[in-house]
Image (cartoon, rainbow, N blue to C red):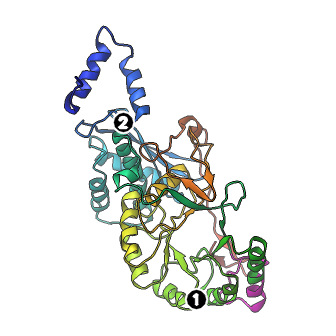
């Protein structure tokens, strides 16, 4: 007769230390971590350590360890990398000794435990820790995170990145380029025509079977954005992304009314409160929250629910690493209003111990491994740890003024 959940740990230890034991306790813990499902719903588990790693490419990882040998991984905002890494370590004072599976509770405690709430660095810290806690929780129950959120809402996830016959990816994104980037407050017809002609040539090359978004990256001033969105309309862009900075939502909403092409934004917006005004003012139709910045898996599920009420889909932002993609794929698998995943065709073989399921016909199959569904190769990761490259200001080469990038 098998033991009950409550005395499973004692029973297993008796086997390990008994005369018929085949493994050391350390070997069993390692095996249990690999199996990722040896902790039952009623078993105790506590956080023992929180570590952060900054890579040379500015990606920031967080690793949370437990007394059960189960570990969780997450990622934080790639800008202000050192600040994010240092700030996350401070959260260890709260988190160590607690049950990691109370993910929603911990999100609230970390967010509301500070007098000054939100902000990019603070929310990025919450995002990375949230991913790692969900990773642990899924491993404890032996299922991918989306199965803890009501189960899958789709069988596969559409991705965009590099258009390819091999992978079947038929969606991509480009910037507005002419002979230079159009950053002037009011660009003349020569620059506007150059941008439209280049995009038109790209459309002609790929045909209407490829969806092509155009990312203004918040680097185009509103008067110029107004000119460009009209000039580009005949070429049927998939969406206009970050037509202006998301600091003045009214300006974005005004521009959105001037075009029938969907407006997308969200990579620099965090938490449900940041997206509330976007939805209410219809400043964008497509939301692009970054799971390493907007609040993690917990918060993106909430943002998706808000967006559903406005018939707005999510296309999660992803300029980062494998935890960013894996966490975004968990959201894609668990919400009804998912559109497409940015850089969903990235493979991250330089950081993963096992490959991701392949992209086929433009879609990636759902991750089936427990937790986030990936396995970080710590040796590969440690080989890339180092001083992050700096982000530098950009300047107008004519008059020397600062411009957005």
- The residue under the point 48% across, 57% down is 328
In this orientation, which residue lies closer to the viewer: 393 or 17? Answer: 17
- The residue under the point 42% across, 68% down is 270
**Mark 2 residue element:** loop
- The residue under the point 56% across, 92% down is 258
Q: Is residue 193 magenta?
A: yes
Q: What x and y, as percent, mark residue 110?
A: 31, 56
Q: Which residues make up the magenta segment?
A: 176-194
**Mark 1 residue element:** loop
Please give the residue where the numbered disc 1 appears in the rendered image. 259
Q: What x and y, as percent, mark residue 335?
A: 41, 63
Label 1 neighbour load within 10 Å: few <14, some 14-19, many 20+ = some
Secondary structure mostly seen in magenta is loop
Instruction: Classify the position of the N terminus by image quarter.
Output: top left
Q: Please identify the quarter of the rendering in which residue 223 is found.
A: bottom right
User: Horizontal placement of 331 versus 346: left or right?
Assistant: left
Instruction: Classify the position of the C terminus by image quarter.
Output: bottom right
Can residue 399 be seen at all in this image of the molecule?
yes
Number of marks drawn: 2
Can residue 346 be seen at all in this image of the molecule?
no
Q: Please identify the quarter of the rendering in which residue 403 is found.
A: bottom right
- The residue under the point 41% across, 21% down is 27
Q: What x and y, as percent, mark residue 350?
A: 63, 43
Q: CA distance from mark 1 to mark 2?
A: 51 Å
Label 2 neighbour load within 10 Å: few <14, some 14-19, many 20+ = some
Please give the residue where the numbered disc 2 appears in the rendered image. 37
């Amino acid at each position: 007769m098998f033991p009950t959940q409550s005395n499973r740990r004692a029973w297993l230890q008796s086997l390990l230390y008994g005369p018929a034991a085949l493994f050391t306790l350390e070997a069993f813990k390692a095996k249990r971590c690999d199996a990722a499902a040896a902790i039952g719903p009623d078993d105790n588990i506590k956080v023992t350590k929180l570590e952060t790693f900054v890579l040379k490419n500015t990606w920031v990882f967080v690793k949370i360890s437990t007394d059960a040998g189960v570990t969780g991984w997450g990622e934080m905002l790639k800008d202000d990398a050192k600040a994010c890494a240092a700030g996350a370590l401070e959260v260890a004072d709260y988190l160590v000794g607690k049950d990691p599976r109370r993910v929603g509770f911990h999100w609230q405690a970390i967010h509301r435990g500070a007098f000054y709430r939100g902000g990019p660095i603070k929310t990025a810290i919450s995002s990375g820790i949230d991913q790692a806690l969900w990773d642990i929780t899924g491993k404890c129950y032996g299922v991918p995170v989306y199965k803890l959120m009501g189960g899958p809402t789709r069988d596969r996830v559409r991705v965009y990145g590099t258009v390819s016959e091999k992978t079947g990816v038929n969606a991509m994104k480009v910037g507005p380029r002419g002979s230079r980037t159009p950053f002037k407050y009011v660009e003349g017809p020569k620059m506007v025509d150059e941008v439209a002609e280049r995009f038109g040539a790209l459309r002609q090359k790929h045909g209407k079977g490829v969806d092509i978004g155009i990312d203004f990256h918040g680097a185009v001033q509103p008067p110029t954005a107004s000119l460009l969105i009209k000039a580009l309309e005949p070429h049927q862009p998939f969406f206009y992304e970050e037509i202006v900075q998301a600091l003045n939502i009214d300006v974005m909403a005004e521009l959105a009314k001037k075009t029938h092409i969907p407006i997308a934004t969200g990579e620099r917006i965090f938490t449900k409160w940041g997206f509330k005004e976007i939805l209410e003012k219809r400043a964008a139709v497509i939301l692009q929250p970054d799971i390493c910045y907007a609040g993690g898996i917990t918060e993106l599920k909430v943002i998706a629910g808000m967006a559903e009420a406005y018939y707005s889909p999510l296309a999660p932002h992803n300029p980062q690493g494998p935890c960013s993609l894996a966490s975004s794929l968990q959201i894609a698998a668990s919400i009804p209003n998912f559109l497409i995943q940015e850089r969903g065709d990235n493979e991250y073989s330089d950081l993963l111990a096992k490959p991701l399921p392949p992209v086929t016909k433009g879609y990636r199959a759902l991750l089936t491994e427990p937790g986030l569904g990936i396995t970080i190769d710590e040796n590969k990761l440690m080989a890339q740890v180092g001083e992050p490259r700096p982000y530098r200001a950009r300047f107008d080469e004519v008059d020397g003024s600062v411009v957005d990038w």
